[in-house]
Amino acid sequence: MIVVKSVAILFVFLSSHLALAQWKEPPSTGSPQSRLEDRTYMAGQSGMGATITAQLEDAAENAKHHKIVVRAQTDGVTLRPRQVSSQPNLDEARIQYQLDTQMPENTSSHTWTFARVSPGSHTVTVRLVDGDNKVLAEPSALTVQVP
């Protein structure tokens, strides 16, 4: 009887010790944990969201000819022009290119050219928007000086 009680006490002791030891390290799922930047801009969402980056193409040379050429790179969405009769899908978007305070140009093109730009300092804002013109990602703002 004493042997059975001793084995039972030893079992309880070892079981509780093993149970504590198994959670000292988080379980591995095979995916990186806390390594990816959260790129979501939409309120109330989590995870990897849509992104947009923009850059000026040959800024100095184009500025001499009074034009601005912008190239945008997107990720996480499919670019499609807005069709009036269709409902927008969650993974579809458009790019808005805006020079200073002018009306934004909506397009599905990764490149946009502003021609006949007046001399001076200008700001080009590039946004990724859904079918209702809601911003999906952090906008890019580019500054260019036209001589």
Image (cartoon, helix red, strand yellow):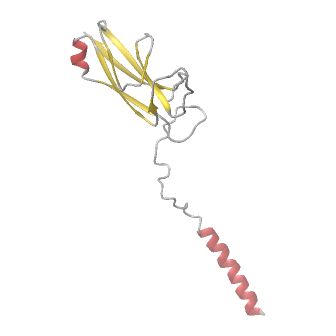
Which residue: 62% across, 73% down? 18
111 with respect to 106 (left or right): left
**At 59% from the left edge and 32% from the top edge, which residue is drawn?**
43
Is residue 83 found left or right of 75 in the rendered image? right
11 left or right of 122?
right
Residue found at the very far right of the displayed protein = 1
Residue in front for this viewpoint, 112 or 39: 112
Instruction: Tell me: residue 74, above or below residue 104.
Output: below
Residue 27, percent from left and from top:
55, 62
Residue extending furthest front?
85
Foreground residue among 29 and 6: 29
Residue 41 in sight in this render:
yes
Q: Observer-nearest residue: 75 or 31?
A: 75
Q: Residue at x 55, y 22 (%)?
A: 85
The image quarter containing residue 122 is top left
Q: What residue do we see at 50% from left, 22% from top?
A: 83
Above or below, 147 against 126 in this view is above
Q: Position of residue 57 (x, y in %)?
A: 27, 23
